Amino acid sequence: MQMTTAEQKLGESLLQRVADYLPPQGQKLVREALEYAVEQHAGQTRRNGDPVITHPLHAAETIAALQLDAATIAGALLHDVQEDCGVSNAEIAKRFGDEVAQMVEGVTKLGQISGHAADADTANRQMQAENLRKMFLAMAQDLRVVIIKLADRLHNMRTLWGLDRERQLRIAKETMEIYAPLAARLGIWEMKWQLEDLAFRYLEPEQYKRVAEMLEIKRDAREQYVKQVCDILRSELAQHGVKAEVHGRAKHIYSIYKKIGKYANDGRDVDEIYDLLAVRVLVNNVTECYTALGVVHGMWRPMPQTFDDYIANPKESMYQSLHSTVMALNGQPLEVQIRTYDMHRSAEFGIAAHWRYKEGGKRDSDYEEKLTWLRQLIDWQSDLAQAEELVEAVKTDIFQDQVYVFTPKGEIKDLPAGSTPLDFAYRIHTDLGHKCVGAKVNGRLVSLNFTLKNGEVIEILTSKSSKGPSRDWMNANLGYLRTTHAREKVRAWFKKQERAENVARGKEMIEKELARMGTSFAEMQADLLRMFKFEDTEELFLRVGYGEISTQHIANKIASLIEETTEIEEFEAPAKTTYTTGIRVLGTGDLLTRIARCCNPVPGDAIIGYVTRGEGVSVHRKNCKNVLHEDETERLVDVEWGQRGQMYPVSAHIEAWDRVGLLRDVSTMCAEEGVNMTGVHTQEGEDGHITIFVTLETAGVEQLTRILNRLESIRGVLSVSRRIEGTPSAKRSA
């Protein structure tokens, strides 16, 4: 490798770090990526005069410190070769594999998020919104792309001194508003605090200097005090049989600056900031966490309202720890954090500590829960058309500090700080928000614009006679709604409140649902009115139109009737050939059976067998066109469904208006329903129309009906049908 001494040290340090945890094959990939990056960036320099190769080296070092997989480290090393060196993505894929190439492509496409100073024009705000959309899409496809981008930004912030003041301010502002909060939501605390401190240094240089000097003045005395406290606490814990690691915890400049501002607003002096001094206690298990807390409180008096149990109530980033501020030696306030070693790793490295792509690791069972907020972002980035709405939603609903409150059943919900009972109601369910007439907090009636606090139990009072949201709720000055999510729901309600609109919409929804199930409203009208106890169809349409009765409810009510009265023509569909022993051929021994590709029956369908030449019995639906028109009827045999528990492929197609995030919404909904998508094929139509052909693995008719109903509820979807004609076979995803 042709590098200077300094660069060689960086490269050797990286290789040594990955050697500590990656297998030989992973180490080889990193070494080859490093050599290629050095070769491609040879002779290039950054604006500050440093060799370009130092930048990907530092980014890769940050990724390796998180102990991510070899592909991610290779992606970090190569993340600039496409843009700076003109290397094609195909060349990267050829040398390092598709996984690395896709990450490099993702980082390259992200580009730079536009700044949005106070005087930014509409075009700049729109550009920022589009870049945010790209960020969310990249996160949805592969979260590692954004972790590389965070590492890239961290090194850029460390070398920001080489740019002019205008660019420093722009980059520092976008770092503070987007990147640092993003690192926090991913739980990567090490990146979060560094990004904040670096951005603060450029945005508020005088304040940064003042806080830094304040910390430096009594640094020696403070460190000596913390050492004394740690020794005493370590000894006391040992006497109680708790083996613990106790050490001082550094306080970060920006967090102290925020505390100073908060205390100033409350009329308190900086000397009253209780947790400038802090220690951290690491133990082996949760039981020892609470034992250690008892020891601490037994030694020193806890200060009122300073205890937080994030073990029982984890933060949105899944952060867990016990926090308590006590009056320690000499009556001086001291913050104590107590957590297990696993919790500590999660707190420092966040989602990276649970990464499912990690070499030799298993997928974290909590992975999807950790990314609930990301799915919310993906939903919002497509729902909010205006740039200002998207940016505001991100900054207030996602990147703002959170409060943690409880439902009456004890379920914890996180909301942006400053949220109200109405925000809580809409977070639970849109209809709950629309029907809200009052709220109780900890059993006490409060106004609907009451500001929620951590640990409160919220009960929403509803009325069936409620006429829906009040227009006062949309008045920002009255403070009823603080989240963009809730305001959007109320706005949508007012757009649809006209009765005629609701009736027309309900009629359309019912007809579409029945057509998808193979019948019509004319055939089912009498049954529907009887089952839902309505005297006229308009009332039924109205209830469906504004959401009181869902199409899923209708489908469940009439599924059995449709099964008895309809025959559905089937076409050849994209499906794998499935051999199964879950079907019995009546009157014979244990014959090999397989699911027919043409109609893909599932448990609950009426079926019949066809004796093939050399491939056993092919199982069809009784109304399959291939068996209805079969001349050799002697080859048809009776079969019946045997044991359940097997998954069966079913072909469906989705007609929709194309939009960013549509496929993600479809796959997310299938995952939530426990339905596997084994194949996807899209076909673009005219005027933004798209057809998505999917092969779904379901357990039977009931689950199939449910997932088809849910898929049709996705925004922009026009229809969902089980019938498919002339679609090429789809390959199972790797």
Image: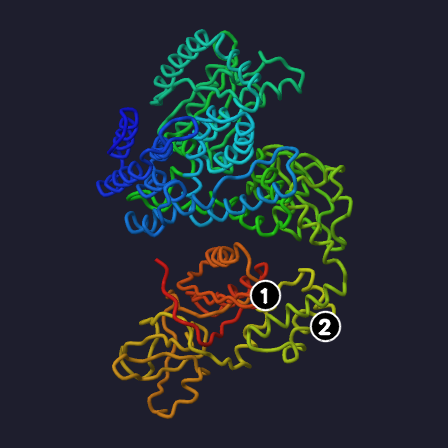
* Picture layout, residue 449 above or below residue 513: above
SS of the residue at dot 1?
loop
The residue located at (76%, 65%) in the rendering is: 500
Coordinates of residue 82 in the picture (x, y in percent):
38, 44
- Label 2, label 1: how many angstroms apart (C-alpha)? 34 Å
**Local SS, label 2:** helix
User: In the image shown, does 39 or 214 lie closer to the viewer?
Assistant: 39
Circles 2 and 1 in contact, beta carbons < 8 Å: no
Examine the rendered structure and indicate whether residue 393 appears above or below residue 642: above
Label 2 crowd (10 A; few <14 / some 14-19 / many >=20): some
Which quadrant of the figure contains the C terminus? bottom left
Residue 438 horizontal/vertical position (percent)? 73, 44
Residue with the mark numbered 1: 687
Residue 497 placement: quadrant: bottom right
Which residue was labeled with disc 2?
537
| Amino acid at pointer 1 | Asp
**How many numbered markers are drawn?**
2
Q: State the residue in front, 202 or 27.
A: 202
Is 54 rendered above or below residue 367? above
Quadrant where the N terminus sits is: top left
Residue 206's image quarter?
Answer: top right
Left or right for 106, reference 377: left
Residue under the point 36% across and 87% down: 636
Q: Residue furthest front?
A: 43
Farthest residue toward the left? 24
The amino acid on which the numbered mark 2 sits, given as a three-letter code, is Thr
Q: Is residue 296 left or right of residue 283?
A: right
Answer whether residue 239 is visible to the viewer in this image: yes
Q: Nearer the viewer, residue 43 or 379?
A: 43
**In x, y percent, where is residue 96?**
29, 47
